[in-house]
Image (cartoon, helix red, strand yellow):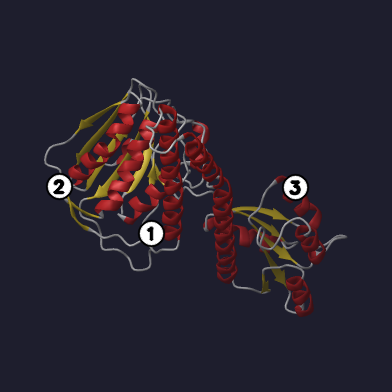
Amino acid sequence: MSHAATDGGIDHDDAPRRRILVVDDDDGLRAGLAIGLKRDGYSVQLAGDAGEAMEKLARTDFDLILLDLRLPGAIDGLGLLNTIRAKRSALNLPVIIISGSSDSANIVTALRDGANDYVVKPFDASTVRARVRTQITLKALKDVNDHFLRTASHDLKKPIMLMLDVARQVRLAAATGQPMSADDQSALDLLIDTGKYMQQIIGELLDMGAIRAGRVRLQKQPTDFGAIVRQAVAHNTGYAHGKGIELGLKFSPGLPHILADELRLLQILDNLIGNAIKFSPSKTHVVISTSADDEWIVCDVTDEGPGLSAEDQARLFQPYQSLSNKPTGNEQSTGLGLAICKELIALHQGDIGARNNPNGGATFWIRVPIKPQAPREAAAVGPPAVVGQGPY
């Protein structure tokens, strides 16, 4: 059984491709850099002078620029660097200077004016690509930090204000020694739900930070996969009942035990089942089914919701995404749950994906190897997920 085959999935890294602009008047150098950078997975555009570069910068939000100091025309590389820095900081748009060996004074000026790094011609292409990777990684860390600050200021600030407001209302309305009114009880329920949401935000932010830093280490032990699935279903039964949704189970008999981190596996299944309920209308079904072959044990979570839009395909399992489908009960979401699932299933050397069902709704699936390979010491996170059709 291979979900990669049956679901039309392909192996790929579903993070967005980083965009690089190479600005140099040497056609051969530009072409050579483009070949190597594209092989590394980057999206590359080329410019032969400052004017062409500025046209491309006006149309595209690049992640890094490789910039030759000696450019033809009225504006040289230093002039273009100053134009870029007037709008974008060194943290927001890294610039690596390409310089001739006799340009040491200009290199100092370029670094003073905001260049992030430099390479001297003639250079080894692998060195340039390594420096590009370093700057792209630093920018990615900066982007994650920026999003964390936005989340902390927006997603946490609003519920804290709500909790304080509700607490004040309850304090004013509830007389000492008197029974609590229905309105006060509803207010306290809202207070608790808001607190739980804040707890979820903090937990998922910490999880994602730990995963990206390579600090997550699975505590693997022989695990009854079926028992974990039943536990995840039990966790979500009350949630489903409250929305008028029926949970169903379809278990294959004799599922083998696997080597897994039970808590992390439960976290993945909780998220997938909870998501199916979150996006499903009342009076529908969510079915959780399991199966296995000689290599993989599989769990499918199938709903009767709106299905998966083509527009969201490129953002499937990416962090901090607000996608087109909206929760049917006005539930809130951090945009991190599926991204964390992808990382955790990769640590189990497994795959995760999604597809639209022929008769409507969507199916999210995971598969975990029955006999995992020995982990490679150099890899903090496993292989990229196999992704089927369309996202939540």
**Element type at mark 2:** loop
Quadrant housing residue 66: bottom right
Q: What residue type is labelled 3?
A: Ala
Q: Where is residue 22 in the image (x, y as percent from the top left)?
A: 68, 59
In the picture shown, does residue 45 fall above or below 183? below
Query: Which sits earlier in the primary sequence, circle 3 or circle 2?
Result: 3
Residue 8 showing in the rendered view: no
In the picture shown, does residue 236 fall above or below 86? above
Q: Residue 381 — which label?
A: 1
Between the residue at mark 3 and the residue at mark 1, the CA separation in whole angstroms equals: 36 Å
Quadrant where the N terminus sits is: top left
Between the residue at mark 3 and the residue at mark 2, the CA separation in whole angstroms equals: 56 Å
**Element type at mark 3:** helix
Q: Which residue lies furthest to the left in this view?
A: 254
Q: Position of residue 258 (x, y in %)?
A: 19, 52
Q: What residue type is labelled 1?
A: Val
Circles 3, 1 touching at the beta carbon (< 8 Å): no
Question: Between residues 238 and 36, which one lies in front from this camera angle?
Answer: 238
Question: Between residues 127 and 355, which one lies in front from this camera angle?
Answer: 355
Query: Which sits earlier in the primary sequence, circle 3 or circle 1?
Result: 3
Q: Where is residue 327 in the image (x, y as percent from the top left)?
A: 45, 31
What residue is shown with label 2? 256
Question: Between residues 45 and 246, which one lies in front from this camera angle?
Answer: 246
Quadrant where the C terminus sits is: top left
What residue is shown with label 3? 58
Q: Which amino acid does label 2 sit on?
A: Pro
In the picture shown, does residue 311 fall above or below 17? above
Residue at point 42%, 38% (across, down):
176
Residue at point 37%, 41% (across, down):
353
